[in-house]
Image (cartoon, grey):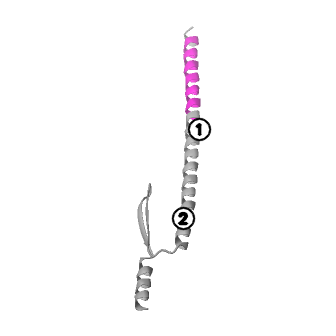
Amino acid sequence: MMNETLATAVSDHGALALALAIAGTAAGLVRAYVAHRTRLHEEREASTRTAARATWLVRLAEADHDVVRIVERDRDGHREVELGSRDATRRDDTREAA
């Protein structure tokens, strides 16, 4: 009788351990899938932003501007770039000399 009770208790604990192992594995797989989808979404968004930025810069370069100042703020930080300030000064000097 004692052996049967002990065998049943061990069997119940084994089934519980197996159920917990399966639940843990399933939770890990779901977490990995969500992380993978999140990473893909972030990469796609960054790629779209990069393409839009490049298109905008090409259009900006084609336009006739003396000085162009670009200010960007994103999760990577803060950037400020000024383009054409030296060229604009040279053009003004050339125009004045002529």
The residue at the point 58 percent across, 15 percent down is: 8
Residue type, mark 2 in image: Trp
| Residue 71 position by quadrant | bottom left
Q: Which residue is mark 1?
A: 29
Nearer to me, 14 or 6 = 14
- In reply to whether residue 17 is colored magenta, the answer given is yes
User: Closer to the camera: disc 1 or disc 2?
Assistant: 2
Q: Main secondary structure of the magenta part?
A: helix
The residue at the point 55 percent across, 44 percent down is: 35
Q: Mark 1 or 2 closer to N-term? A: 1
Secondary element at tag 2: helix
Residue at mark 1 to residue at mark 2: CA–CA distance: 40 Å
Q: Which residue is mark 2?
A: 56
Report the label total: 2
x then y, percent, for residue 50: 54, 60
Above/below status of 79 relative to 94: above
The residue at the point 55 percent across, 46 percent down is: 38
Nearer to me, 11 or 34 = 34
Q: Quadrant of the C terminus?
A: bottom left
x then y, percent, for residue 67: 44, 74
Bounds of the magenta span? 4-25
